[in-house]
Image: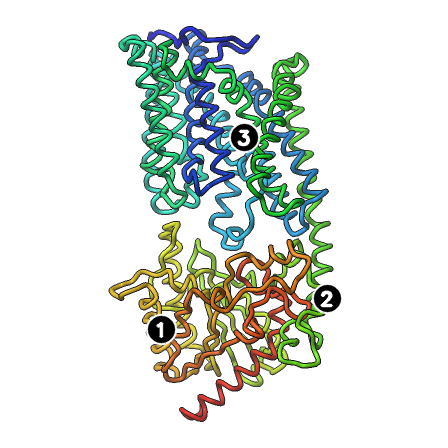
């Protein structure tokens, strides 16, 4: 049997908890520093998120070394006791921070955030936050939400899932080996090796095909823990003995350099954790392999410095506290500045130190928690988690009721004269009425039509969904609305017109997917979503052309920026390719049906969020954007519609931008519900202006080309 892991010359020892290896504490300090700096200044340290991968390798090494010592000594693993120790080590601090997030959200959190925050608090309380975020990654609407204050719990969830499964792997392998009179260590090594290879292969494939989900997946991360485990299983002391102290010191610095390079060159758009994840993972492995060399210029010597040692000691609590402060302080103080970011660092260190001294250490050593085979540990953890889940379930409905009431008031106001778009061009109306009921940012973010949101075919599928509104008998004709989320944001105006004019309105929507014969380009390289967009587009064209009752006309619009995110496909620029694709798709439909297509020019796109401007400014009239900046991204739909037979352009720019200034609020109504989607209230008020342009366009097509 191979020699057991025996860490050499630890610099200090914590009572009852074994040696504290300086290189491990140094790595923890480096890892948490990278993560915090990345979250505060992402542009300056774009790959700082790889600090999480460093933590994963460390966990794999330490936990496997502990389990291995037990297997070598007894031939088995005491799983319940292991789980109890992990709970006492990790859950008291994490559940305390979750409780703090819960209270802060109830006291100062925007009502519009309650639904999202408490959903993620519940997921974090039972350590499945990584899967909740993975689900958000394939949900278009969730992608547009601000990051929840529990987002960093995804890595803690991955770790807890690892801690749950890993002793089972060791125990099962040791049991099988004992029954077959084999070495338990060898059996465990084989089992871990197989898991590492399988996980790494899966990570390469899934990171390339679905990176948004792969990033949060436990299965794509398991190999990182596994490589740390292999260090413990192979008996690293034998490797260390082959190197002189100076050689080991050099090895550690090489590993640290690899981690640093990864933090500088890795981008969030990379397929991660794919091949590029090897850089920080292998770098961490090298630092651990080097161990405590004792050389004068070694990393372990630097790690023994008091500030580094302190940061390593409190790294867990630093990780827990920093992100909620980053997300939640703007709820009270507005956008973060350099001064507030420095303040967050100081506050994080203070809170981390207090948490470690008052919660982490006392709970880890509490005798009452270790009594009766750790039963109190499991009961206490389950009770606190259940309490957090209970609050997370009961709080959102209260917030929803308040939001629903205020949105109903805003929607009703939008239908009155001089409200919203109705105020534009009417001398009797005030574009910026004093005391108007512009909903706050915590309300307007929810100002979307809940029925329309159910009409979208999402990224994960190519399902053709048709929602029908208005007069089912189509007394005055059948109309279609086709496009992406910007078409969905315009839908309330079309729905209002359908009710008023007796149309049957069919709606076909897919987020991020224009009705265009081009292949989308996505920064996340989600091939599944790209393929589904093409399939959906073809189905829509077929459904529109083969409808039992021909459409009187089709209205389409899409996000101008997304319209330019296409593969050039032989054209000089993506814009040219997009124009060609739109013209080809529209042309084929018009040729087959002679049905007119009315193209709505995309709404303005702001450099800053108009909703945030309204939230931060006491003067709503000051939240404006110039025409040049608001339309700096050319809309390919405008160029595509020009000169096409039976295609007309509807331009609502004068409504969005009266007096050549695009406004965040018009006629007492917030124009947008986020950075670029119209609010339902404003879309409802937009119906008369849209109606005028539809009638004018159809009249023009009738005059120039005959009956539509």
Report crowding for label 3: few under 14, some 14 to 19, many 20 or more residues within 10 A (C-alpha). many
For marks 1 and 2, give the one nearer the viewer: 2
In which quadrant will I find the C terminus?
bottom left
Q: CA distance from mark 2 to mark 3?
A: 43 Å
Is there a contact, CB below 8 Å, between mark 3 and mark 1? no
> In terms of image quadrants, where is residue 389?
top right
Give the numbered dot on residue 399.
Answer: none
In which quadrant will I find the N terminus?
top left
Q: Earlier in the sequence, mark 3 or mark 1?
A: 3
According to the picture, the residue beneath numbered tag 1 turns out to be 585
Image spot of residue 204 (x, y percent): 33, 39
Q: Residue at x 48, y 64 (%)?
A: 629
Q: CA distance from mark 1 to mark 2?
A: 43 Å
Image spot of residue 665 (x, y percent): 63, 65
For marks 2 and 3, give the one nearer the viewer: 2
Above or below for 669 versus 231? below
Q: CA distance from mark 3 to mark 1?
A: 50 Å
Residue 669 visible (yes or no): yes
Image spot of residue 672 (x, y percent): 59, 63
According to the picture, the residue beneath numbered tag 3 turns out to be 319
Q: Residue at x 62, y 42 (%)?
A: 328
* Local secondary structure at mark 1: helix
């Amino acid at each position: 049997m191979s020699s057991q892991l025996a860490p050499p010359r630890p610099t200090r020892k914590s009572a009852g908890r074994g040696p504290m290896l300086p290189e491990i504490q140094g790595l923890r300090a480096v890892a948490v520093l990278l993560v915090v700096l990345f979250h505060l200044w992402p542009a300056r340290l774009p790959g700082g998120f790889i600090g999480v991968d460093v933590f994963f390798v460390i966990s794999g090494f330490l936990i496997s070394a502990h389990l291995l010592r037990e297997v070598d000594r007894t031939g088995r693993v005491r799983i319940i006791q292991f789980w109890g120790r992990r709970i006492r080590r990790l859950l008291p601090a994490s559940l305390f921070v979750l409780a703090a997030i819960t209270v802060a959200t109830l006291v100062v959190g925007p009502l519009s955030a309650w639904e999202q925050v408490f959903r993620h608090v519940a997921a974090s309380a039972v350590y499945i936050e990584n899967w909740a975020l993975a689900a958000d990654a394939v949900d278009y609407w969730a992608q547009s939400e601000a990051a929840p204050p529990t987002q960093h719990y995804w890595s803690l969830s991955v770790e807890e899932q690892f801690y749950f499964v890993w002793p089972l792997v060791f125990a099962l392998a040791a049991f099988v080996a004992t029954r077959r009179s084999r070495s338990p260590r060898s059996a465990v090594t084989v089992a871990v090796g197989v898991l590492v290879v399988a996980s790494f292969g899966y990570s390469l494939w899934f990171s390339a095909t679905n990176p948004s989900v792969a990033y949060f997946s436990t299965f794509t991360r398991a190999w990182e823990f596994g490589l740390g485990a292999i260090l413990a299983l192979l008996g690293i002391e034998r490797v260390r003995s082959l190197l002189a102290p100076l050689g080991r010191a050099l090895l550690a610095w090489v590993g640290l350099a690899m981690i640093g390079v990864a933090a500088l060159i890795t981008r969030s758009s990379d397929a991660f954790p794919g091949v590029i994840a090897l850089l920080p993972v292998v770098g961490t492995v090298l630092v651990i392999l080097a161990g405590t060399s004792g050389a004068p210029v070694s990393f372990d010597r630097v790690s023994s410095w008091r500030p580094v040692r302190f940061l390593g000691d409190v790294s867990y609590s630093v990780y827990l506290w920093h992100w909620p402060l980053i997300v939640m302080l703007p709820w009270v103080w507005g956008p973060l500045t350099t001064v507030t970011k420095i303040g967050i660092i100081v506050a994080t260190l203070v809170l981390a130190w207090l948490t470690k001294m008052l919660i982490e250490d006392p709970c880890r050593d509490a005798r009452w928690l270790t009594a009766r085979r750790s039963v109190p540990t499991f009961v206490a953890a389950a009770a606190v988690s259940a309490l957090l889940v209970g609050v997370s379930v009961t709080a959102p409905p209260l917030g929803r009721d308040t939001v629903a009431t205020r949105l109903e008031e805003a929607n009703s106001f939008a239908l009155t004269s001089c409200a919203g778009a109705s105020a534009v061009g009417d001398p009797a109306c005030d574009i910026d009425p004093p005391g108007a009921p512009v909903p706050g940012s915590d309300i307007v973010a929810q100002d979307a039509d809940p029925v329309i949101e159910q009409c979208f075919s999402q990224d994960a599928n190519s399902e053709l969904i048709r929602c029908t509104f208005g007069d089912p008998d189509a007394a005055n004709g059948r109309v279609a609305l086709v496009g992406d989320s910007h078409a969905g944001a315009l839908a309330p105006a079309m729905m209002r017109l359908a009710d008023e004019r007796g149309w049957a309105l069919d709606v076909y929507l897919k987020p991020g997917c224009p009705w265009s014969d081009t292949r989308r380009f996505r920064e996340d390289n989600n091939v599944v979503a790209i393929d589904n967009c093409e399939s959906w587009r073809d189905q829509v064209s077929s459904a529109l052309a083969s409808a039992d009752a021909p459409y009187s006309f089709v209205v389409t619009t899409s996000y101008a920026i997304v319209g330019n995110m296409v593969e050039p496909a032989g054209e000089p620029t993506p814009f040219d390719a997009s124009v060609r694709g739109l013209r080809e798709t529209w042309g084929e439909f018009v040729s087959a049906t002679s049905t007119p297509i009315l193209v709505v020019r995309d709404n303005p796109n702001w450099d800053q969020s108009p909703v945030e401007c309204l939230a931060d400014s006491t003067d709503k009239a000051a939240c404006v954007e110039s025409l040049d900046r608001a339309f700096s991204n050319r809309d390919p739909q405008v160029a595509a519609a020009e000169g096409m037979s039976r295609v007309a352009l509807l331009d609502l720019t004068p409504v969005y931008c009266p007096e050549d200034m695009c406004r965040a609020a018009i006629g007492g109504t917030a124009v947008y519900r986020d950075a670029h989607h119209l609010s339902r209230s404003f879309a409802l008020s937009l119906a008369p202006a849209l109606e005028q342009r539809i009638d004018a366009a159809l009249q023009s097509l009738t005059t120039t080309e005959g009956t539509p």
